[in-house]
Amino acid sequence: MQRRTSRTLSRALILAVILAVGATIWQSWSAGVPGVSGVVQTAWGPLTPADRDLIVKVRLAGLWEMPTGQQIQQQASNPAVREVGTKISAEHADLDLKVRGIADKLGVLLPSSPSPQQVNWMKEISSKTGSEYDRTAVQRLREAHGIILPLLAQVKVGTRNDAVRAFATEGALYVNRHISYLESTGLVDYTALPESPSPGVLSGSADWRDLIVPGLILVACLLAAFGIGATLRGRNRAKTTLPPVVAAAPPRVATAASLIALPGPRVDAPGVTDTGPRHTVRR
């Protein structure tokens, strides 16, 4: 039973290592591709999960950027930043009407509150004052618009739904304008913005040399996994081939009776005649 358990454990370890390494390498090689499950047919064409995700994320953007823009109008110390806040707040109110309209048309359920990350951004901005408030507000808004813009472009070029394509086209116009507003303040720190995602090993500019490091990592992990399995199997085999242990008999302890030989009565052997002299007692 123990041998079977060790063998199962070694196989499970090897499989876990292979799956972990394979998943890591595949994730680093390939870009994220929206799933194809959950496609719904509509009068404007098929509605995919990627289409619905875009509508939801534009709604989330408006849920925190509208109140943040209103707050900037009142708290920003720089007049240019206050003007940017006014424009962004008003235009997001218009965009939010379009989001709710297409969501009703296509049957997409919309969120009613910002995401946890967006809430943290709002708290961070509110905690600042003066020029630090201006820089933080501009930086976070610019970062958020840089996240949603690639998503709009990706859905626009790939969607099969006419209504979603028109919405993505118009939404991209809003986001590009907002980026221009924010950058016009001169407060954007471009070095602090998230870097563009790597195209991965499967990009068009990659060649066979890009596979050297991932390949070496995979080989090393496979060798380690097989080494662990061989070690476990060797230990199990050693346990099963050991000779049985025989319990040794306890040593005999000499007793006093065995050490002292007491003389017993004389016993003549049969057929032996006593020929020695005999003494007769006279009376």
Image (cartoon, rainbow, N blue to C red):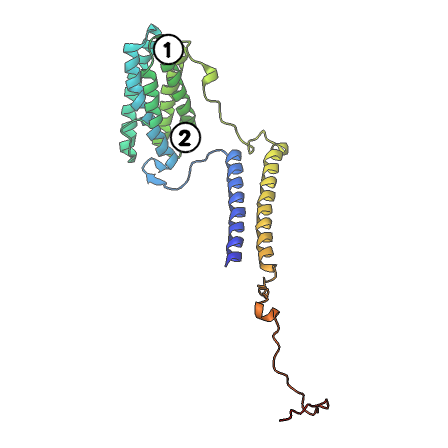
Identify whether 194 is placed above or below 257.
Answer: above
Q: Would you identify the image quadrant in which residue 166 lies?
A: top left
- Can residue 86 be seen? no
Determine the secondary structure under disc 2: helix
Mark linked to residue 132: 1
Q: Residue at point 57% right, 68% down?
A: 256
* Residue 199 location (% of width, % of height): 52, 29
Q: Report the front residue among 106 and 268.
A: 268
Identify whether 16 is placed above or below 77.
Answer: below
* Residue 257 location (% of width, % of height): 57, 70
* Residue, disc 2: 155
Q: Earlier in the sequence, mark 1 or mark 2?
A: 1
Determine the secondary structure under disc 1: helix
Residue type of the residue flagged with mark 2: Val
Q: Looking at the figure, which quarter contains the C terminus?
A: bottom right
- In this view, which residue lies farthest toward the front? 283
CA distance for labels 1 and 2: 36 Å
Disc 2 packing (10 Å; few <14; some 14–19; many ≥20): many
Would residue 37 appear left or right of 62 to someone viewing this image? right
